[in-house]
Amino acid sequence: ATGKYDKCTGNDESSLFKLNGEQTMFHHTTEKISSDYYVTKHEYDKDNDVYTYDVKSDVGNTYFFIVDTKNNQFRIVGNNKSSDNKTYMHVYTIKQSWTD
């Protein structure tokens, strides 16, 4: 599905996303918080050349993660908890990646 995002803003934030070797959990660390996201489904989208992950956070919220190595982007798609339940997307620029 294609969507249009009409309220776009930006800010600088240092974030570290770490995916375990089994691809079953992401750990996200910022200056203020750290969270775990448990992968319920993952696959490679050949048409768009991205890896996608359905995840559930350590507090029970569900998200859709998109790892786009070609464009150096890590995207998080979720829904607002407010009554409007609108979809939002956070886009992070991948500045460095490595494997242990």
Image (spheres, rainbow, N blue to C red):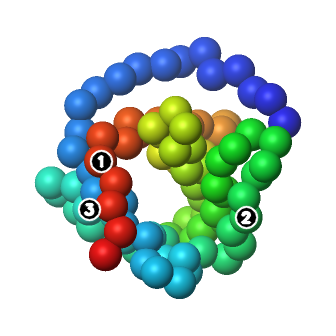
Say whether residue 62 is visible.
Answer: yes
Q: Where the C terminus falls, by quadrant?
A: bottom left
**86 or 56, which lies in front?**
56
- In the displayed structure, 37 sits above or below 63; it is below
**14 or 45, which lies in front?**
45
Residue 30's tag is none
Marks 3 and 2 close (CB-CB < 8 Å): no
Residue wearing tag 1: 96
Amino acid on which disc 3 is placed: Thr
State the image coordinates of residue 16 (x, y, percent, origin top left): 28, 57
Q: Residue furthest top?
A: 6
Mark 3 or mark 2: name the one nearer the start of the chain.
3
- In the displayed structure, 22 sits above or below 33; it is below
Residue at left offset 24%, top offset 31% = 12
Mark 1 or mark 2: name the one nearer the start of the chain.
2
Number of other residues with Cα within 10 Å of mark 2, as a class: few under 14, some 14 to 19, many 20 or more: few
Nearer mark to the viewer, of 3 and 2? 2
Report the Cα–Cα distance between label 1 and label 2: 22 Å
Mark 3 or mark 1: name the one nearer the start of the chain.
3
Residue at left offset 55%, top offset 38% = 70
Residue wearing tag 2: 43
Residue at left offset 48%, top offset 39% = 73
Classify residue 38 as left or right of residue 18: right
Residue wearing tag 3: 29
Nearer mark to the viewer, of 1 and 2? 1
